[in-house]
Image (cartoon, rainbow, N blue to C red):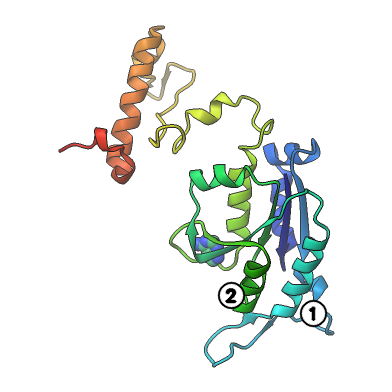
């Protein structure tokens, strides 16, 4: 998958060099290209923002640098499909595991990270008219910009790409996967730590009993923490 990111803080994305995603990058499974928006700002101070039309607090990102940058990325399209442009925004559709699965099917994603009070609306309108654009929120809280949201999305999407996670089975039993339940608690050795024991059923060698216990834990935890995720048939009357 090709992923282009546009930001005024390209250094944020150094974090993606670490761990699994870094490995996926060096193995060529993810072709990540990070662009500094200021390279498309041509005045002495490389200005990317200006005061809001109509007045008000804060600054708005100017359309020209975005236009130049996104035109350049689209012109350099080499994945053979029309890229999907994602603008992280608290005003967007909420990012979920389902959306991560959907986006993992794309060949080319472009993330446009806004700062300040946002990006001039005409940028969204321009690219939505020319192609596919989505505004996506990672939750009901406000970040200072789209960078952290983009990293979260790239990690959630990247780990679903074939070959990125060594054991694909480990993807299936996680929270929000398969049946929408949260995951069961995990334990390892030693069997006792600070007087706290691993639940005996997990040491029993009885696979059916272990499976039953894990399922119960998932249902109980989901009911307690996120009751709205429980499938209809598991809701108590
Ligand atoms: N930018 C600022 N807040 C955000 C959020 N919650 N999700 C995505 N992008 C954002």
In the rendered image, the vertical position of residue 235 relative to residue 107, given as above or below: above
Residue 142 visible in the current orientation: yes
Please tell me in which quadrant of the rendered image residue 222 appears. top left
* Distance in Å between CA atoms under marks 1 and 2: 18 Å
- Identify the residue position indicated by label 2 in the image: 118
Viewport quadrant of the C terminus: top left
* Viewer-side residue, 200 vs 236: 236
Question: Of helix, strand and loop, which one carries label 2?
Answer: loop
Identify the residue shown where x is 61% and y is 44%. 157
- Identify the residue position indicated by label 1 in the image: 46
Residue 120 visible in the current orientation: no
Please tell me in which quadrant of the rendered image residue 231 appears. top left
* Viewer-side residue, 183 vs 62: 62
Q: Earlier in the sequence, mark 1 or mark 2?
A: 1
Please tell me in which quadrant of the rendered image residue 180 appears. top left
Give x and y (percent) for residue 79.
78, 48
């Amino acid at each position: 998958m090709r992923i282009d990111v546009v930001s005024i803080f390209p250094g944020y994305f150094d974090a993606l060099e670490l761990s699994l995603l870094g490995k996926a990058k060096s193995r060529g499974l993810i072709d990540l290209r990070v662009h500094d928006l200021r390279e498309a700002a041509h005045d002495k101070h490389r200005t990317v923002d200006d005061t809001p039309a109509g007045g008000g607090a804060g600054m708005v990102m100017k359309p020209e640098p975005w236009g130049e940058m996104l035109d350049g990325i689209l012109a350099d399209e080499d994945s053979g499909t029309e890229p999907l442009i994602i603008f992280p925004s608290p005003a967007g559709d909420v990012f979920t595991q389902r959306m991560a699965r959907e986006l993992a099917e794309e060949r080319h994603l472009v993330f446009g990270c806004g700062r300040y009070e946002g990006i001039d609306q005409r940028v969204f309108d321009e690219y939505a008219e020319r192609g596919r654009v989505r505004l996506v929120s990672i939750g009901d809280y406000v970040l200072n910009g789209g960078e952290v949201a983009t990293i979260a999305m790239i990690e959630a999407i990247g780990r679903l790409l074939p070959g990125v996670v060594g054991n694909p089975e480990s993807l299936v039993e996680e929270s929000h996967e398969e049946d929408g339940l949260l995951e069961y608690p995990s334990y390892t050795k030693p069997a006792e730590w600070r007087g706290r024991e691993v639940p005996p059923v997990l040491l029993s060698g009885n696979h059916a009993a272990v499976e039953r216990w894990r399922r119960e834990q998932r249902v109980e935890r989901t009911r307690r923490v996120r009751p709205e995720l429980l499938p209809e048939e598991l809701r108590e009357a």
